[in-house]
Image (cartoon, grey):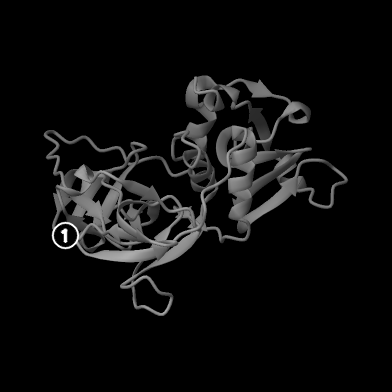
Amino acid sequence: MNQPAIEMELEKPRVRTGLVVNTGVANIYSEDTFHSEVVTQAILGEMPEVLDQRGKWFLVRQWDDYQGWLYHFYMFKNPEYEAQREWIRVNALTTYIREEPAETAATIRDAVFGSELPMISQDGAWLEVLLPDGSSGWLHDEPQETAGPPREQLVSIAKRFLGAPYMWGGKTPKGFDCSGFIQTCFKAIGVILPRDARLQHTFRDLPPVDIAEAQPGDLFFFSEREQRITHVALCIGGGEFIHSSGWVRIESLQDGSPRYNHLLRSIFITAKDVTELLDGG
């Protein structure tokens, strides 16, 4: 994803609080029309800052400072939602929230990996969660990722998304662009990265590392536009990397590998060492 965040000068931003994303995935657009491009996405339970309004469209700023236009039917006003005490994070790639704790019960919403929702109660493996509109439902989640070194966790999480389709502006298992994929993987282990590949490249001025010395979890950057970063991938070791290109897949920068991608090797710019991020620096 290489679309720059929308930059708008608002004389007096009118911040509206209490609006919560009330659907599994909500597209955020470059303009206040569905005919404009999708620049990023929000997910169920997120509470973006609202900066402005045009009719039924809201200009929002997300937790990663990315801005775009969100249509009103994706959100519900619930100022008390953030005050809930016990929250759970969805670990399943996608799951359904049902009226009752049973697979045969009617579906009332879906949720994707990383969604955070207030928990009301538990019935065995079923969790009752509070939705932004005040209703409640039940989801059957998967166990959380096992503990381990951060680099191993990153690779393990990334591989869970293998096969997910490419989607411009996407950042969920329903569809990722390249930088949305990377941002989602890092956020899952508590590391916040910028939204776009070019900003991830310059983030925290991370040191470069030779391909041969890159460790799993380091980032590979590529350019098709005169050194402007246009693609990012996650190193998994041995010159191999995982990225979203058509779909989430594993390829290699090593000539002779059956997974060798000669095009990406020809536009490779640099690898960045993420040790500082993973060490909490």
The answer to which quarter of the image holds residue 82 is top left
Q: Give the residue type that dot 1 points to.
A: Lys
Residue 31 location, x and y as percent? 28, 53
Residue 170 as seen in the image, left or right of residue 242 = left
Question: Looking at the picture, does residue 144 appear above or below residue 192?
Answer: below
The answer to which quarter of the image holds residue 221 is top right
Residue 133 location, x and y as percent? 20, 61
Q: Residue at x 79, y 48 (%)?
A: 260
Q: Residue at x 13, y 58 (%)?
A: 55
Residue 25 location, x and y as percent? 37, 59
Asked if one can make out residue 219 in the rendered structure from this viewpoint, the answer is: no
**Closest to the observer, 101 or 229:** 101
In terms of secondary structure, where does tag 1 sit? loop
**Closest to the observer, 279 or 162:** 279
Question: Looking at the picture, does residue 118 appear above or below residue 6?
Answer: below
**Closest to the observer, 225 or 235:** 235
**Closest to the observer, 146 or 266:** 146
- Label count reads 1
Q: Residue at x 60, y 40 (%)?
A: 153
Residue 101 location, x and y as percent? 37, 70
Residue to which mark 1 is pinned: 56
Question: Looking at the picture, does residue 55 appear above or below residue 224?
Answer: below
Question: Looking at the picture, does residue 51 appear above or below residue 100?
Answer: above
